[in-house]
Image (cartoon, rainbow, N blue to C red):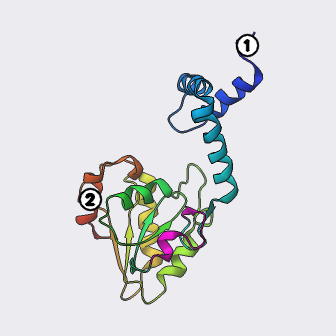
Amino acid sequence: MSLQGAEITRLIELLSKLPGMGPRSARRAALHLLKKRDALMRPLGAAIADAAEKVRDCSVCGAPDTLDPCAICRDTSRDQSVICVVEDASDLWAMDRTGAFKGIYHILGGTLSALDGIRPEDLRVNGLVGRAQNEGVREIILALSATVDGQTTAHYLTDILERPGLNITRLAAGVPVGAELGYLDDGTILAALAARRAS
């Protein structure tokens, strides 16, 4: 017999689907939300509904935003000649919060994976190829995770993006093998960005 009603069970089940949130953490979060329903739960519910309605992926780079093109793509102070390729939005946010990178981004939406059946057509590869063909683009930084799939994707992109006048670089020192970019601290990302090398 369940100790809580269907609504609480559903809340816990949904919370447990969030990254890093197991069943125990989900139960604690649900109880906290219920205790703070006016100060936290209702505003959170409204914010989630508002984001679900208004936030879309940028048609240029894939970043989530209410604007299309997104705020980063529309920022004329950024260096439009350098594109930093990342796996997902959390990686973009990690790179951008350092303040070291002043170019623009391209979110792939993941990495190639034979095991998971993720092919180039499942990612935003075609959009990247189109952007890289622009003669104004002089550098593509492949800021992908130092995993087997990340390295495979970097090699694939290096091959298909290569053209005269385009410098393709990868993050170097500071990114440990097996690490995901979104979990690294600012100092590690800064070191990796500063020490990038030709792909």
Please state if 117 lies on the left or on the right of 82 as rendered: right
Q: Is residue 147 visible in the rendered structure shown here?
A: no
Along the polypeptide, which appears first: circle 2 or circle 1?
A: 1
Residue picked out by circle 1: 2
Q: Inspect the magenta stretch and tell me whether residue 68 lies in it.
A: yes
Q: Amino acid at mark 1?
A: Ser
Query: Depth check: 74 or 120 in front?
Result: 74
Q: Quadrant of residue 17?
A: top right
Residue, x 28% and y 63% (percent of image)?
193
Q: Inspect the magenta stretch and tell me whether residue 66 lies in it.
A: yes
User: Residue 70's x, y, as percent?
Assistant: 54, 69
Span colored in magenta: 63-75
User: Residue 121's x, y, as percent?
Assistant: 62, 66
Q: Amino acid at mark 2?
A: Leu
Q: Are marks 2 and 1 in contact (CB under 8 Å)?
A: no
Residue, x 65% and y 37% (percent of image)?
42
